[in-house]
């Protein structure tokens, strides 16, 4: 949770980011993640391990209007933690602050 909060705080267009449900907010972002682990062996007997992370997100206004939603997946990471961070990065990028000169 803290990783995504930090990423959104650093790069999003949001004025504030909180996980405190008692704070007033304009938008609620719900994120669900999962990981899977696989081991494969090629014809030479070499073993490779990989983690795949998936995440679903949904941003809803306080009035209940869906503002953004989607799914992201990453399978190129070497650990579960790295895979989760990769998909959370992709979600944070959805909410990047507009570029200003």
Image (spheres, rainbow, N blue to C red):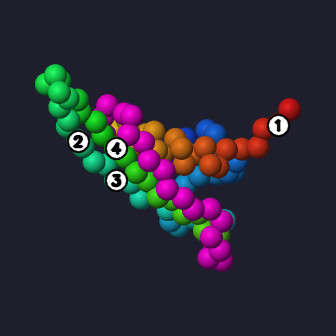
Q: Are marks 2 and 3 in contact (CB under 8 Å)?
A: no
Name the residue: 61% across, 38% down.
10
Camera-side mark, 2 or 3 = 2
For mark 2, give the secondary structure.
strand
- Range shown magenta: 62-80
Camera-side mark, 4 or 1 = 4
Q: CA distance from mark 4 to mark 3?
A: 8 Å
- The one nearer the camera, 26 or 56, is 56
Instruction: Write down the residue under mark 1.
Output: 100
Q: CA distance from mark 4 to mark 1?
A: 35 Å
Q: CA distance from mark 2 to mark 3?
A: 14 Å
* Sequence-first disc among 3 and 1: 3
* Sequence-first disc among 1 and 2: 2
In the image as oriented, which residue stretches furthest toward the front? 43
Q: Is residue 87 shown left or right of residue 61? A: left
Q: Position of residue 26 (x, y in %)?
A: 66, 65
Instruction: Write down the residue under mark 2.
Output: 38
* Sequence-first disc among 2 and 4: 2
Q: Position of residue 99 (x, y in %)?
A: 78, 38
Name the residue: 32% across, 31% down.
78
Instruction: Write down the residue under mark 4.
Output: 52
For mark 4, give the secondary structure.
strand
Can residue 23 be seen from the camera position used here?
A: no
């Amino acid at each position: 949770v803290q990783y995504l909060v930090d990423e959104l705080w650093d790069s999003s267009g949001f004025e504030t980011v909180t996980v405190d449900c008692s704070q007033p907010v304009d938008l609620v972002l719900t994120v669900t993640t999962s990981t899977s682990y696989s081991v494969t062996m090629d014809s030479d007997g070499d073993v490779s391990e990989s983690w795949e992370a998936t995440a679903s997100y949904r941003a809803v206004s306080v009035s209940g209007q869906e503002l953004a939603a989607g799914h992201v997946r990453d399978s190129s990471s070497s650990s579960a933690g790295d895979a989760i961070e990769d998909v959370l990065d992709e979600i944070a990028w959805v909410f990047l602050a507009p570029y200003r000169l």
